[in-house]
Structures are given as structure tokens and as C-alpha cells.
Image (cartoon, helix red, strand yellow):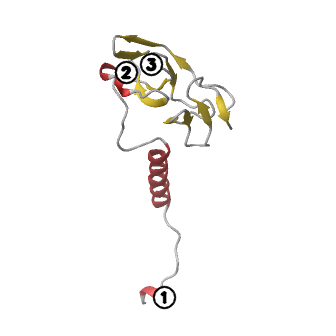
């Protein structure tokens, strides 16, 4: 029997599950910002790291992902980076914060949703400054 004469068979359950797991992992890395990170750790965050008028990804003192926005010389606000729609990781884009899962967009200065499907604002976090150093709790 030649290879072209063999009957076609469907892949086994293990092959289907392995392929599905690999695809899900790749999608999560793409949607969740896998790969290199530009987030600052809590101990090294300074005002110099946050340009006026922009948002940056940071870590809280407990190591959670957060977003920090600087609207003026000493005006800072921070929000959880967890999207209020489906829990995706929201990323900074200038004056906006965007979730890659369903494209919800939030205002970086207020955390309010600008476009959905998210309808609730991002969770605010405490920000303190001491000299040039910033702490997000």
C-alpha cells in the first residue's frame, strides 16, 4: 500500500488538545503583552520615568501590574491594569489606556471608559511621591 492509498484518519484527542493548548498559550502571550516588559519595579520608579502627558506601565509595592499617568509636574494618578470588562491587561497608549482583548479604551487621567465594551472605570490606586521617587500602592 502506498502512502497515498492509506485511508485518511482524524487526529487523536491528544493531538487536538496539545494543538489547542499551544494556540491558547500563543494568544495569551500576544493579548497579555508577553515577551519583554518595560514596567518599572516599585523601588526604581521616579518622576523622570513618567513623561508629562503620558501613561506608563508600573508595578505596585505588592508587585501587581498598574498604570501611572502624569498630567502635570507633580500630578499623578494610578489605576489597576486589569480591564473591568473581561480582565485583560490594559496597556498605556499616550493619554489613553487600551485593553487588547476586546479593544476597550480608558482615559489615562480618570480611568473612565472612552469606548467599550467596558462600562466601568479602572480601579484607582494610591500614589505617593517623596522627592523624585514615586510609590504606587
Q: Nearer the viewer, residue 73 or 90?
A: 73
Q: Position of residue 9 (x, y in %)?
A: 52, 73
Marks 2 and 3: CB-CB under 8 Å? no
Sequence order check, earlier mark of 1 and 3: 1
Question: Which residue bears the numbered disc 3?
Answer: 73
Question: Which residue occupies 63% across, 33% down?
Answer: 85
Q: Residues within 10 Å of mark 3 (few under 14, many from 20)?
A: few
- Indicate which disc residue 5 carries: 1
In the picture as drawn, the residue positioned furthest to the top comes out as 130
On screen, residue 106 above or below 76: below
Q: Is residue 28 left or right of residue 106?
A: left
Question: Which residue occupies 46% across, 87% down?
Answer: 4
In the picture as drawn, the residue positioned furthest to the front comes out as 73
Tell me the SS state at disc 3.
loop
On screen, residue 91 above or below 110: below
Snapshot quadrant of residue 106: top right
Q: Is residue 53 left or right of residue 121?
A: left
Q: Position of residue 78 (x, y in %)?
A: 50, 21
Q: Which-is-in-front pick, marks 1 and 3?
A: 3
Question: Which residue bears the numbered disc 2?
Answer: 47
In the picture as drawn, the residue positioned furthest to the left comes out as 44
Sequence order check, earlier mark of 2 and 3: 2
Q: Could you tell me which quadrant the N terminus lies in?
A: bottom left
Q: Nearer the viewer, residue 113 or 25?
A: 113
Q: Residues within 10 Å of mark 2 (few under 14, many from 20)?
A: some
Sequence order check, earlier mark of 1 and 2: 1
Question: Which residue occupies 50% across, 59% down?
Answer: 16
- Report the Cα–Cα distance between label 1 and label 2: 70 Å
On screen, residue 45 above or below 131: below
Tell me the SS state at disc 1.
helix
Snapshot quadrant of residue 33: top left
Q: Could you tell me which quadrant the C terminus lies in?
A: top left
Amino acid at each position: 500500500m502506498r502512502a497515498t492509498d492509506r485511508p485518511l484518519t482524524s487526529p487523536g484527542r491528544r493531538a487536538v488538545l496539545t494543538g489547542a493548548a499551544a494556540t491558547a498559550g500563543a494568544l495569551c502571550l500576544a493579548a497579555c503583552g508577553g515577551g519583554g516588559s518595560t514596567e518599572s519595579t516599585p523601588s526604581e520608579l521616579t518622576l523622570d520615568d513618567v513623561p508629562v502627558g503620558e501613561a506608563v506601565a508600573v508595578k505596585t509595592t505588592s508587585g501587581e501590574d498598574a498604570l501611572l499617568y502624569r498630567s502635570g509636574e507633580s500630578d499623578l494618578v494610578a489605576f489597576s491594569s486589569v480591564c473591568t470588562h473581561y480582565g485583560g491587561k490594559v496597556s498605556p497608549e499616550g493619554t489613553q489606556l487600551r485593553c487588547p482583548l476586546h479593544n476597550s479604551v480608558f482615559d489615562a487621567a480618570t480611568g473612565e471608559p472612552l469606548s467599550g465594551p467596558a462600562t466601568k472605570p479602572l480601579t484607582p490606586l494610591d500614589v505617593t511621591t517623596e522627592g523624585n521617587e514615586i510609590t504606587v500602592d
